[in-house]
Amino acid sequence: MKKIAISDMTLKEMSKTAQLSFKEKIEIAKLIDRLNLSVIEISPISNAKIDTILIKTISTCVKNSVIALPVNLTEEGVDEAWEAVKGAKKPRLQVVVPMSAVQMEYICRKKPAKVLEMIDVLVKKAAAVCEDVEFVATDATRSEPEFLRKAIECAISGGAKTITICDTAGEMITDEFTKFITELYSDIPDLKDVRVGINASDELNMGTATVLSAVKIGVDEIKTASCNSTLPSMESVLKIIRARGDTIGVTTDVGVTEFQRAAKQISWICEGKNEHTPYSAASASASDGGDSFSLSEYTDMKTVLDAVASLGYDLSEEDAERVYEEFKRTASKKQISPRELDAIVASAAMQVPQTYKLVSFVINSGNIISSTANVLLEKDGKQLSGVCIGDGPIDAAFLAIEQIVGHHYELDDFQIQSVTEGREAIGSAVVKLRSGAKVYSGNGISTDIIGASIRAYVSALNKIVYEEA
């Protein structure tokens, strides 16, 4: 019984139609990984700063599946993609190239001979850094047969371990596509030595039947999606394998019941994301100085972001979306003041990789002794200690951190507040550090307000280090 590999393209497909937040993308990746799917595909890097953080975060969270990342079609694109995905337990680089003449001209702006040269360079460069390289021949069913054969041979000789053939337009019926793949096996003997995958559009509602028929003739990997896609539905593929897997000689580790539970969660995350809802008109606007304003749930996104800018923040597009989502949730209960908007930015804005991690801290303080702090941070696997005396326990802790990093940052603002009520209330701290002309905000939450303050400082510090690196 042959075990078929399933490559899930939900995240890649949803990026075309839905405005998923950073957190939602990570949650979907975790859900897919728990199903033991072979591959999770993500979109290529378009914004180096934002996308790299997302990819690195997903790579850390995913434990079972291969993380497949397309490279942008330059040598620099290979380096950029590898830097982002190399931390994954099972990284894969994809060289995705159109095969039809029209698409080559439109996407690559190259003639066939130059496209072959590009494939050779990029696959070899990818294979030099990553053991798992996939060559994806998009629009293959509308290509010139001789060119397609040369492109696949070039990719295999360059080191590609997986060759994926795509019926991007979804024009072929099941028998035609099966015959197409069979002829490729016949014309290219080396295909038998690599993993062969297929991507068949469900444009004619025949995608599921097409991919499973291809499996019967030797295909190893099929591409599906969990929701909102023109690809074969993963649910329908799994149902057929469960019902007729013995007949077609294939099996999978993924159970239909487990998938249905995960699919409901994914569908809930994606629900309503495909329709653009215009933002309501502003009921208030920020003052020029940002010192006094009140924003309501009816304030539109532009006004909110203008207010954020007036506080000294320079947000990325991803951060702006996350901040506005959190703003709407909070503003549905109360008017938002400048200080509350500060806290929203600090808690909602995208977190960066942790250059410094808090290991422990010891604080000694009282009304007859000077406050001292012993803070232990970790950087690159090494533990660094700082001990300082300060004007109070929090000041001592901040000075100890400055001693560790060897740099003083101006404390632009510091806020502490109770998030919950009662004796075991959770405290939230916001620390704003100024580096040059920019302000970086960090948020920390803990039942110990000193611990929350230290975590907030480290959070802001990590943003400075990442930005300036």
Image: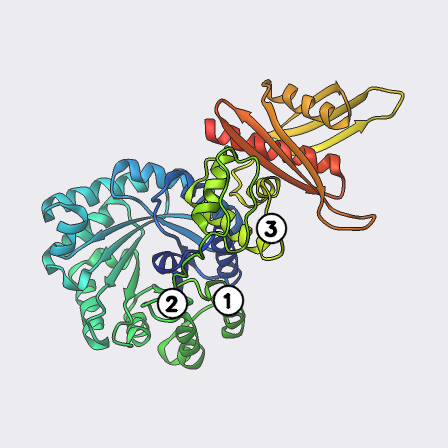
Q: Residue at x 40, y 78 (%)?
A: 240
Foreground residue, 388 or 87?
Answer: 388
The three-letter code of the residue at mark 2 reads Asn
Label of residue 302 in the image: none
Q: Position of residue 286 (x, y in %)?
A: 50, 41
Between disc 3 and disc 2, the foreground one is 3
The three-letter code of the residue at mark 1 reads Trp
Q: Position of residue 263 (x, y in %)?
A: 49, 69
Q: Earlier in the sequence, mark 3 or mark 1?
A: 1
Q: Earlier in the sequence, mark 3 or mark 2?
A: 2
Q: Residue at the right extreme?
A: 368
Q: Earlier in the sequence, mark 1 or mark 2?
A: 2
Q: How far apart are the two marked residues, 3 and 1, measured between alpha carbons? A: 29 Å
Q: Residue at x 14, y 45 (%)?
A: 109
Give the structural element (helix, strand or loop) at label 1: helix
Q: Which quadrant, please, contains the N terminus?
A: bottom left
Which residue in the structure is indicated by mark 2? Answer: 228
Q: Position of residue 413 (x, y in %)?
A: 62, 30
Locate residue 138 relative to residue 385 in the image: left or right: left
Which residue in the structure is indicated by mark 1? Answer: 268
Q: How far apart are the two marked residues, 1 and 2, measured between alpha carbons? A: 12 Å
